[in-house]
Image (cartoon, rainbow, N blue to C red):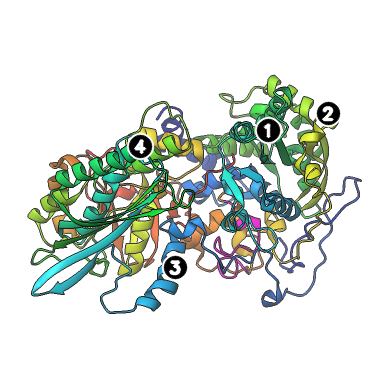
């Protein structure tokens, strides 16, 4: 398939892996910021194929994972109100608030709908003028522009029964917060390609210079990730710390000016709480004064909900790269996707869920050994022998 | 991470001064008492039915194991096969039932009428039986146009004729407007299991070859494209089909097939996990050998779904003794509904109950049982 197959080519992957193996002379800790990259890394087994010296630390870039408990509780409260149609992207429905999730609100009669675009929610608002329609606007710089545009459209078309429950977050302040942490082990970043396709790369040189870390804009397919790792490791080995774009087919230095203009028009920068991490200054957006009448928090008077999360789950350490999922005592025993202790086990992009779903074979019910670990189950050979040798011939089957 | 355990996490909600120090320091302390922790996400016990209970994954299985099986009991009740194999008057019967609640009623490549016939015919076929007789129960919603009911009945009748089965008994109920979704259909079916055929997951042994009869994920994506109004650039038609002819062709080669399954809800991943668990073997897949049509791969890439979990309605997965695999594969490919058949993996003694995929790059990952519904990802 165009633009997918080419970036999953085993032969090209092998060459990139060989180059990485040939480049590395000592241990390096890289953080992939985005949950989509984490998912791809674990799903394709990329971490198992990298040299032992290259450790991937999974960052806080899963929008579902970092949405604070109190925002989920506000969503549950609004979705439970009679007359409300609460629209959300699918994977927020399973994220637990205090004692329940949006699926259960739906099971109890709430009108909760999965949509694929905020514009779908706006259409529902238009079709149901007697109902209040709320869209759950969460996520990073990737989902913020369409949400901004939807509110802008609602205002322009006079659709008053539409509002947005906003909990948008921004990547650069999170990178800064991670680098400021005294326990930070990150030596280089794979920046989230899709975030940069919107925002461009202008925010990163200052971070790279101040914290002396290479920041390589990276895509999501296996070859994209390997190329991002290769370029980051190359910089580290040379003692460099520049911003590099390894995803030029999607990212321009200036980003997407129209999307940025829409963000400036509709949102304003604010402090945001990140689940498991705490408040990071200037790390999010809220609706600006002009659009405040489309703010669901104000419309439904839920600003007062202030949930304090019990310090039960160590996902904060996972989100900051201080702890590998399987190093948590609860991993796979007390905490599974079925009964998650925290959001990193709920979302398919959460590091804990990715480890649980794809890595149980290597991990068993791993316990913390109290030592920095490399990726679990990583074979030292760049590539295992042809895996299809022990299976009857596959000729004639269509291969993806 | 140093080897001193830290206090559990950085408490979320810690409000920090905006001086830029955004993280609170972590004090070293004694290891937390895990069992004393309160879980902020107590979703262990669902007190009400959620959609995931009908998703064909772990939640569905738990409902059967914890609610239905204890209540019904009985040695013939099988929760590991889609049809019961019964001895009656000297004959070996397969008996199965299935309900259909699909929306929309008519979709590219089929309708609820096609599903109602083929679903039950296929459940019987997976035990090696040729379906002979079907019952058909309609639950209609007040206000549904009669011509819609007529179209459903017509497609159902046509599908029965194509599959060579007879609808011999039926029932109709009507619920008040707003209490149904237009038309629900239940079908039950019986058929005879030929002598020498014994298809059960318990017969699977390490070394078996796993074959899928064609490209996966087609039905689920076809339904999604019309239900959610998603345009994938090409029209994707459901693969809805009756598999009794294909199974007959396979059994003509050898009756020594170990198990067959039609991977409907929960997709290929659910079927493979069920068989791995029930047989106590591990399954190893070659990810690149699993046939996924471009349209399905595209749709799944856009939505953040995995084709392995997407429903099929005209595919089967077979666990076959290694020495018979080539003949069975050839017989499948000679049949129109098996033209795209492919060997996708094998069973092993290692990791019993677990399905593991060798990725295209040479890594490995676990292919888990789906929990409930697959959810489209945010980004």
Question: Residue B111, located in which quarter of the rendered image?
Answer: top left
Give the spatial CA distance, label 2 vs label 4.
44 Å
Left or right side of A220 for A146 = right
Chain under label 4? B
Chain under label 3? B
Chain under label 2? A
Local secondary structure at mark 4: strand
Residue B322 to residue B310: above or below? below
Local secondary structure at mark 1: helix
Question: Which numbered disc, 1 or 2, marks the residue that appears first in the sequence?
Answer: 1
Give the spatial CA distance, label 1 vs label 3.
38 Å
Instruction: State which mark lies toward you, 1 or 3.
Output: 3
Left or right side of B99 for A149 = right
- Residue under numbered circle 3: B63
Give the spatial CA distance, label 1 vs label 2.
15 Å
- Residue under numbered circle 4: B107
Residues tagged 3 and 2 counted as in contact (Cβ below 8 A):
no
Picture disc at residue A147: 1
Residues packed near mark 1 inside 10 Å, few (<14), some (14 to 19) or many (20 plus)? many
Q: Magenta stretch?
A: A330-347
Instruction: State which mark lies toward you, 1 or 2.
Output: 2
Q: Find out whether residue A341 is within the magenta segment.
A: yes
Residues packed near mark 3 inside 10 Å, few (<14), some (14 to 19) or many (20 plus)? some
Residues tagged 2 and 4 counted as in contact (Cβ below 8 A):
no
Local secondary structure at mark 3: helix
Q: How many marks?
A: 4
Work out whether residue B93 can be spotted. yes
Question: Which numbered disc, 3 or 4, marks the residue that appears first in the sequence?
Answer: 3
Give the spatial CA distance, label 3 vs label 4.
29 Å
């Amino acid at each position: 398939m165009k633009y997918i197959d080419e970036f999953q080519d085993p032969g090209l992957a092998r060459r990139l892996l060989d180059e990485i193996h040939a480049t590395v002379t000592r241990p390096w800790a890289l953080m992939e910021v985005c949950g989509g990259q984490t998912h791809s890394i674990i799903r394709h087994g990329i971490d198992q194929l990298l040299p032992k010296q290259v450790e991937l630390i999974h960052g806080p870039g899963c929008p579902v994972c970092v949405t604070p408990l109190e925002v989920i509780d506000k969503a549950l409260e609004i979705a439970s109100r009679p007359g409300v149609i609460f629209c959300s992207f699918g994977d927020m429905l399973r994220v637990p608030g205090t004692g329940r999730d949006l699926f259960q609100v739906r099971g109890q009669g709430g009108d909760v709908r999965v949509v694929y675009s905020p514009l779908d929610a706006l259409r529902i608002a238009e079709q149901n003028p007697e109902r209040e329609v709320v869209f759950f606007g969460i996520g990073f710089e990737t989902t913020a522009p369409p949400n901004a545009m939807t509110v802008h459209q609602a205002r322009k078309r006079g659709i008053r029964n539409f509002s947005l429950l906003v909990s948008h977050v921004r990547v650069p302040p999170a990178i800064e917060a991670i680098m400021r942490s005294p326990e930070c082990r990150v030596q280089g970043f794979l920046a989230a390609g899709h975030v940069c396709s919107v925002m461009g790369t202008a925010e990163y040189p200052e971070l790279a210079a101040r914290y002396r870390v290479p920041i390589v804009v990276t895509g999501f397919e296996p070859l994209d990730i390997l190329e991002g790792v290769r370029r980051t490791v190359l910089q580290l080995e040379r003692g460099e710390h520049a911003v590099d774009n390894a995803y030029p087919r999607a990212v321009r230095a200036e980003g997407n000016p129209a999307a940025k203009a829409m963000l400036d028009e509709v949102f304003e920068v604010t402090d945001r709480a990140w689940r498991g991490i705490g408040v990071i200054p200037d790390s999010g957006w809220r609706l600006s004064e002009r659009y405040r009448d489309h703010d669901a928090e104000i419309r439904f008077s839920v600003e007062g909900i202030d949930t304090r999360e019990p310090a039960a789950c160590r996902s904060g350490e996972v989100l900051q790269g201080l702890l590998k999922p399987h190093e948590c005592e609860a991993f796979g025993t007390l905490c599974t996707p079925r009964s998650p202790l925290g959001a990193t086990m709920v979302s398919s992009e959460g590091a804990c869920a990715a480890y649980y779903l794809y890595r149980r074979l290597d991990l068993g019910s791993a316990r913390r050994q109290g030592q920095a670990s490399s990726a679990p189950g990583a074979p030292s050979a760049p590539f295992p022998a042809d895996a299809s040798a022990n299976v009857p011939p596959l000729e004639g089957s269509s291969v993806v | 991470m140093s080897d001193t355990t830290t206090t559990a996490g950085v408490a979320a909600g810690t409000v920090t001064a905006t001086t830029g120090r955004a993280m609170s320091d972590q004090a070293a302390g004694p290891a937390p008492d895990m069992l004393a922790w309160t879980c902020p996400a107590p979703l262990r016990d669902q007190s009400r039915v959620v959609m995931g209970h009908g998703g064909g994954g772990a939640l569905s299985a738990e409902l059967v194991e914890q609610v239905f099986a204890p209540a019904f009991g009985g040695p013939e009740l099988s929760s590991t096969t889609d049809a019961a194999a019964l001895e009656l008057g000297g004959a070996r019967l397969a008996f199965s039932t299935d309900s259909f609640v699909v929306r929309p009623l008519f979709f590219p490549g089929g309708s609820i009428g096609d599903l109602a016939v083929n679903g039950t015919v296929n459940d019987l076929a997976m035990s090696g039986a040729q379906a002979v007789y079907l019952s058909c129960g309609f639950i209609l919603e007040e206000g549904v146009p009669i011509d819609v009911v007529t179209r459903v009945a017509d497609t159902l009748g046509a599908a029965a004729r194509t599959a060579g089965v007879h609808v011999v008994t039926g029932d109709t109920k009507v619920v008040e407007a707003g209490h149904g979704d237009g038309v629900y259909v239940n079908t039950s079916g019986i058929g005879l299991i030929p002598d020498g055929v014994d298809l059960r997951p318990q017969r699977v042994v390490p070394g078996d070859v796993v074959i899928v009869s064609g490209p996966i994920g087609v039905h689920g994506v076809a339904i999604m494209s019309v239900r959610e109004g998603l345009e994938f650039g090409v029209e994707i038609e459901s693969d809805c089909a009756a598999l009794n002819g294909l199974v007959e062709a396979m059994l003509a080669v050898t009756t020594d097939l170990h198990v067959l399954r039609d991977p409907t809800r929960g997709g290929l991943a659910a079927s493979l996990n069920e068989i791995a668990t029930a047989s106590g073997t591990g399954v190893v897949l070659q990810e690149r050998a699993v046939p996924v049509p471009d349209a399905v791969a595209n749709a799944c890439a856009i939505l953040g779904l995995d084709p392995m979990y997407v429903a099929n309605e005209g595919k089967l997965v077979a666990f076959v003794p290694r020495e018979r695999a080539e003949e069975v594969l050839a017989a499948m490919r000679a049949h129109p509904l098996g033209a795209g058949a492919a060997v996708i993996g094998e069973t092993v003694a290692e990791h019993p109950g677990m399905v593991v995929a060798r990725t295209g790059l040479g890594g490995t990952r676990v292919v888990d049982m789906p929990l409930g519904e697959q959810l489209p990802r945010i980004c």
